[in-house]
Image (cartoon, coloured by chain):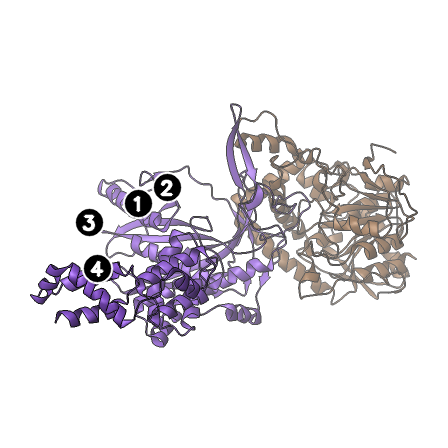
């Protein structure tokens, strides 16, 4: 197969006929999802020649569900953005039926919307992050790209559920129960009202606006009432994600020091120099800038970070309140004028993901739906966002709408 | 101008846990290097910390033993700095929301009066790895042993209430006793499970300002703590008298030279809430369960030992100084031995014997039953005190009962009056001048004559009876 799409192709041939719900599906993952014995470099020189020592919980569960032959697609450095990401291409070219990629700021939904497939980001905490090599622990999760919604449901049945190796999952706390995906395809859920956040569509250009309106009218034809709602602080999702995300990235990247694994600079004279050079040589410009920005908030402007945490809590509350007036929220997925794959600066990355950040900041489930308009140049796509942990219902509703 | 010292302590205590704080690795830092490690404590990519229940229990017991208010909600932060002994670029520590606040301990000051010293806060944190510096050929290399990485600690921060080296040492002694009683930690400075740093500043007597402090580290014993603080007070007083300004810095105590010397300024990184370790929420029910696990603490035990057993306060304090000792003491007393005899024999005989053999009340072959057996024979005059000391020494070497040792080795005390009268007559015949001296009023000679009789009997004679017979013969 194509090495410009894949970083690794499992050479082992299954010795028995696979059984289980995923047995017939070909699956692609990314090299930031740990598979024992596989090169797991997460798109970064920082993890040069790193080989995972055990399977991520998700990988273990995929195998239990019959997924045997897996390949690893190329990815952006540490899953930040979509530059160099080939998961959608692998699907489009028929190399895989399903691809798992990390959704840190909307990657799975923007990639889906660009390619014309479904892209699902589950609620934070429904899928174990154990073995996921990420950058922003409180925002990122495994996401699923697939041409068929049923496949997304099947994968969620397989991989969701509490894991004692990821204590940050809500199954470990008293507050709530994790969603049950087993009846997604049978449930035939429908919704009456979809909320449209005015501030999210205000920035669309005329042709994008027109395309999005066309998508909304198809929803209306399917019997969904579109209710205009307001979230005056919508722009703050971007600032909050940027500040908190960069602070977490700076900390999460702290372990890449060349002491135990990964790239170590050859020319250092002492450990301090080893740190500086190894880390200097390890990260690409985008991730390096992002970490440096995070370090700035940690060391020089901690109160701005505290403000961002407070605003995040308020944004979560305000978004939750919208579900008093609507069953689900509907958003465009991307701004076609901002190419996520070409974004090279922090600003450009946030421009490309400005419409998807809400789900990462709030931990809510979101699904990008293809095929409602699909006109490559102007299609801003459409995503549905549900309350946290309403994932199963969200998928059921989408199945009815898409069917 | 006269100055007074303002001293605060920062105390790290390694909790007595079977596993590390955020993974299931053995909590045995002293094992062969890098034996007790896993993807979590090595912080391999993809690992997620999992906070252990045992660490929370032991930390809570420790806080309760130090009279602290346990916080119903606490959380871990990332203390960010880069060093090869820190495998992830930050240390997990409770900076913003500690487990416990506002505690206290009572100590006896140098003037004999009780003083209450306050504790500011106690927080949990993980220990870092250990660096070993070696050379490979002529190239210096640093090796990292991750056995200690992730070991559960609490840090206890006092208020600046301490005014003298004596009080600082007493505080540490009291703290050690309390935590050992609660089962929170071994608290051994020797083995590094108790580490103390001191912040010292001076101010003119009678004022209440807090001046620039100097931190001192590297004290490896309680005596070191007293010496280092005393040295530092003296050093700062000399600086102030010479008109020098005290600057904030850290100094290392050199126990060989008996001085503190400045060390490289340490880097204070920021503390950011950790997004992966869930917030710790403590219910009243759970806290009550922890309280019920606390044993009778030494303060109350001293009172009870005085009331119930009629010990002197000094004896009661000694018998309560360690939990194992106090339990041993009571186990022996429960074998119907008078408490004062037990306390006296533990203090003067058993404790020195254990110390000499580096044994503890847990691992010594002198069980409470065997020790009680020996004291019972002493009480019944079946063996005299001198012989009992010999029997005690034998008890360490054999697993025989005290009675068997006495019978076999002929330690049984001779209390047969006829036999003793013959003995006394022999002694008087052999020492006519001493006998004469006693009759002439030199009463001190009696001791000499008793000693002679004991010696002739090879220590087996009942000294009380010898004394009676001697006085009878000489008067």
Whether residue A11 is situated above or below residue B172 in the rendered picture? above
Q: Can you identify the residue that label 4 sits on?
A: B452
Residue A357, horizontal then vertical, whole percent: 71, 50
Farthest bottom residue? Answer: B308
Which sits in the foreground, A104 or A183?
A183
Instruction: Give the label, 3 or 2, closer to the camera.
Output: 2
Q: Is residue B465 visible?
A: yes
Task: Please tell me whether mark 2 sits on a helix, a strand or a loop.
Answer: strand
B142 to B453, vertically: above or below: above
Q: Are marks 1 and 2 on the same chain?
A: yes
Location of mark 1 (residue): B232
Check if mark 1's residue and mark 2's residue have beta carbons within 8 Å.
yes
Circle 3: is it few (<14), some (14-19), or many (20+) Cα within 10 Å? Answer: few
The answer for how far apart the CA atoms under marks 2 and 4 are is 61 Å
* Quadrant location, the N terminus of chain A: top right
Label 4 Cα neighbours within 10 Å, binned few <14 / some 14-19 / many ≥20: many
Using the image as rendered, state which of residue B208 and residue A358 is in the foreground: B208
Q: The residue tagged with tag 1: helix, strand or loop?
A: helix
The reply to whether dot 1 and dot 4 touch (C-beta < 8 Å) is no
Camera-side mark, 1 or 4: 4
Are marks 1 and 3 in one subunit? yes
Contact, mark 2 vs mark 4 (Cβ under 8 Å): no
Label 3: which residue? B1
Answer left or right for B465 relative to B342.
left
Whichever of callouts 1 and 4 sits on the residue coming sooner in the sequence is: 1
As measured in the structure, the alpha-carbon distance from the residue carrying label 1 to the one carrying label 3 is: 18 Å
- Residue at figure coordinates x 27%, y 65% from the top left: B113
**Chain corresponding to purple in the figure:** B
Residue B361: x and y in percent read 44, 60
Q: Are marks 3 and 4 on the same chain?
A: yes
């Amino acid at each position: 197969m194509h090495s410009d799409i894949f970083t690794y192709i499992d050479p082992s041939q299954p010795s028995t006929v696979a059984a289980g719900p995923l047995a017939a599906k070909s699956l692609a993952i990314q090299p930031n999802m740990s598979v024992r014995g596989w090169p797991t470099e997460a798109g970064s020189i920082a993890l040069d020649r790193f080989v995972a020592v055990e399977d991520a919980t998700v990988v273990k569960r995929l195998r239990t569900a019959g997924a045997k032959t897996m390949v690893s697609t190329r990815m952006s450095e540490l899953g930040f953005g979509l530059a160099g990401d080939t998961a959608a291409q692998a699907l489009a070219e028929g190399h895989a039926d399903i691809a798992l990629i990390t959704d840190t700021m909307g990657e799975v939904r923007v990639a889906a919307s660009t390619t014309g497939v479904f892209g699902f980001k589950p609620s934070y905490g429904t899928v174990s992050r154990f073995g996921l090599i990420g950058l922003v622990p409180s925002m990122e999760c495994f996401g699923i790209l697939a041409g068929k919604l049923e496949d997304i449901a099947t994968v969620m049945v397989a991989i969701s559920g509490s894991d004692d190796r990821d204590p940050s999952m809500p199954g470990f706390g008293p507050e709530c129960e994790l969603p049950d995906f087993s009846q997604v395809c049978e449930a035939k859920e429908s919704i009456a009202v979809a909320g449209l956040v005015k501030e999210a569509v205000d920035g669309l250009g005329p042709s994008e606006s027109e395309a999005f309106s066309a998508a909304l009218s198809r929803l209306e034809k399917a019997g969904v009432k579109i209710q205009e709602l307001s979230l005056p602080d919508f722009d703050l999702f971007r600032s909050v994600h940027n500040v908190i995300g960069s602070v977490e990235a700076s900390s999460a990247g702290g372990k890449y020091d060349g002491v135990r694994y990964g790239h170590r600079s050859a020319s250092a004279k002492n450990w301090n120099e080893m740190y500086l050079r190894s880390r200097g040589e390890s990260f690409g410009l985008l991730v390096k800038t992002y970490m440096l920005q995070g370090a700035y908030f940690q060391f020089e402007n901690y109160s701005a970070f505290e403000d961002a945490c407070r605003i995040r809590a308020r944004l979560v509350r305000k978004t939750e309140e919208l579900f008093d007036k609507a069953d689900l929220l509907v958003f465009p997925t991307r701004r076609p004028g901002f190419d996520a794959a070409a974004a090279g600066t922090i600003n450009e990355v946030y421009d490309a993901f400005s419409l998807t950040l809400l789900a990462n900041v709030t931990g809510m489930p979101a699904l990008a739906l293809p095929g409602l308009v699909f006109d490559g140049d102007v299609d801003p796509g459409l995503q549905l966002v549900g309350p946290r942990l309403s994932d199963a219902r969200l998928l059921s509703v989408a199945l009815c709408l898409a069917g | 101008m006269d100055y007074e010292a303002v001293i605060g302590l920062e105390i790290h205590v390694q909790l007595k846990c079977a596993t590390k704080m955020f993974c299931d690795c053995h909590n045995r830092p002293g094992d062969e290097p890098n034996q007790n490690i896993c993807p979590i404590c090595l912080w391999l990519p993809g690992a997620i910390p999992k906070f252990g229940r045992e660490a929370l229990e032991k930390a809570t017991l420790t806080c309760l033993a130090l009279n602290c208010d346990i916080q119903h909600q606490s959380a871990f932060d990332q203390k960010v700095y880069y060093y090869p002994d820190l495998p992830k670029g930050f240390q997990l520590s409770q900076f913003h929301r500690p487990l416990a606040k506002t505690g206290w301990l009572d100590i006896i000051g140098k003037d004999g009066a009780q003083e209450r010293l306050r504790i500011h806060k106690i927080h949990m944190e993980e220990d870092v790895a250990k660096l070993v510096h070696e050379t490979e050929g002529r190239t210096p290399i640093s090796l990292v042993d991750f056995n200690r990485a992730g070991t559960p600690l609490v840090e206890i921060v006092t208020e600046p209430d301490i005014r003298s080296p004596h009080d600082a040492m007493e505080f540490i002694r009291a703290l050690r006793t309390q935590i050992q009683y609660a089962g929170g930690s071994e608290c051994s400075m020797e083995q590094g499970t108790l580490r103390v740093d001191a912040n010292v500043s001076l101010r003119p007597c009678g004022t209440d300002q807090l001046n620039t402090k100097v931190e001192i580290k590297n004290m490896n014993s309680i005596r070191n703590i007293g010496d280092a603080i005393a040295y530092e007070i003296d050093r700062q007083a000399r600086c102030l008298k010479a008109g020098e300004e005290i600057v904030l810095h850290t100094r290392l105590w050199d126990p060989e030279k008996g001085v503190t010397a400045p060390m490289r300024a340490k880097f204070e990184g920021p503390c950011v809430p950790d997004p992966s370790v869930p917030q710790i929420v403590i219910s009243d029910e759970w806290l009550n369960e922890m309280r019920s696990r606390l044993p009778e603490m030494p303060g109350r035990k001293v009172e009870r030992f005085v009331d119930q057993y009629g010990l002197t306060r000094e004896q009661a304090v000694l018998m309560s100084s360690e939990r194992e000792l106090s339990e041993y003491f009571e186990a022996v007393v429960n074998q119907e031995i008078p408490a004062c005899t037990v306390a006296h024999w533990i203090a003067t005989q058993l404790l020195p014997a254990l110390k000499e053999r580096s044994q503890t009340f847990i691992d010594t072959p002198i069980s409470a039953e065997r020790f009680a057996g020996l004291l019972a024979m002493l009480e019944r005059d079946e063996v005299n005190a001198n012989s009992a000391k010999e029997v005690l020494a034998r008890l360490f070497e054999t697993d025989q009962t005290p009675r068997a040792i006495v019978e076999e080795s002929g330690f049984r005390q001779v209390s047969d009056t006829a036999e003793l009268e013959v003995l006394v007559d022999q002694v008087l015949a052999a020492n006519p001048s001493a006998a004469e001296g006693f009759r002439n009023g030199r009463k001190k000679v009696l001791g000499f004559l008793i000693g002679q009789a004991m010696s002739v009997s090879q220590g087996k004679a009942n000294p009380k009876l010898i004394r009676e017979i001697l006085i009878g013969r000489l008067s």
